[in-house]
Image (tube, rainbow, N blue to C red):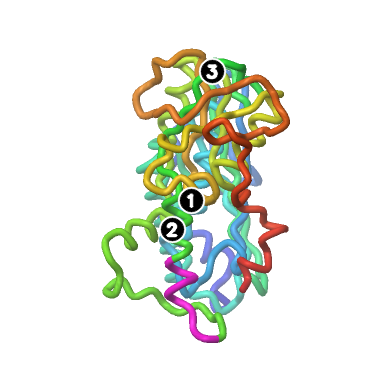
Amino acid sequence: MGELSEGDILRRILSRTGRAAAAILGPGDDAAVVAAPSGAVVATTDTLVHGPDFRLAWTSGHDLGWKAAAVNLADVAAMGARPTALLVALAMPEGTRISFVEALADGLREACDALAPGCAVVGGDLTVSDVLTVAVTALGDLEGRAPVTRSGARPGDVVAVAGELGHADAGLAVLFGRFRDADGTPLPVDDAVLRPGDLAALAAQLRPAPPVGLGPFAALAGATAMMDVSDGLALDAGRMADASRASIDFASAALGEDPARALAGGEDHALLATFPDAELPTGFRAVGRVIERGPAAVLVDGAPYEGRAGWDPYRDWDAAAG
């Protein structure tokens, strides 16, 4: 990177990221112009920092670009909106190889193409840093609908999920459990020594595929509340319960083979939603009920949830950096 100019790097990135269908004016000026037919813009941002959020020994440039896009697309979808554009800021050490940056750009484009067709990078920023950092801002269009917030869940609503639960956490366990040396230094992943289940878990962690298209679908189906499950089902459900002034009671039998991991594991980027009746839209499955607010925000089979809370970047920083 230190041998190229900013303009050279930008040209290499933007030649690979595609064009957003909603872009009236794309990269090249001080700012992009993106159409918002509904008159409202959904905006969200997420930052991935080397160390607490990813390790270069474990992730490729392509996977990093894919994940950076996917986690933001999921947040837009969780509002019931259709993602329209991404703004990407890269802070990179001078020694970063341009081939890594090109692969990252490919990952951004391919994630958008797969998860939110028509969405693409419309601009961003480049700077030098000792720590590799990828910050993405995603924009979305509500298409005339009201946003689906966390605060609309009401007692009697069905609690439903679209997407997988616990798989990304299982992938993280594979990385920390099998690909570190005695001092805790990350080692490159060797796919040849992994079982199919481990490979699938790693894919869920490194290349999440949230059900982005189901966000607007849920809104059209009457979802009363919705959010992206990024920090663990129990922790995020607690946030929804608090915002809605209600409690959420999960049925452990509906949470798969490992309910504890489904409740505590982070980075699944599934969609958690509530609906006023049991006829759920395709892609969602019932996992519990909204009940009147009680002493506990989250319950499992009627009892207060007392397991691992989920991912908190401040509380869990030492564990992530270990």
Task: Return the disc, 3 or 2, that comes first in the chain's sequence.
Answer: 3
Q: What residue lies at 49% left-to-right and 15% top-to-bottom?
A: 222
Q: Nearer the viewer, mark 2 or mark 1?
A: 1
Whichever of callouts 3 and 1 sits on the residue coming sooner in the sequence is 3
Name which residue type carries label 1.
Arg
Q: Is residue 293 left or right of residue 140?
A: right
Q: Which mark is residue 157?
A: 3
Q: Quadrant of the C terminus?
A: bottom right
At 72% across and 58% down in the image, what residue appears? 314
User: Could you tell whether 239 is left or right of 142 in the image?
Assistant: right
Residue annotated with mark 2:
170
Q: CA distance from mark 2 to mark 1?
A: 8 Å
Q: The residue tagged with tag 2: helix, strand or loop?
A: helix
Q: Nearer the viewer, residue 40 or 269?
A: 269
Residue 85, placed above or below residue 35: below
Residue at image position (48%, 79%) is 180
Q: Quadrant of the N terminus?
A: bottom right
Q: Quadrant of residue 280?
A: top left
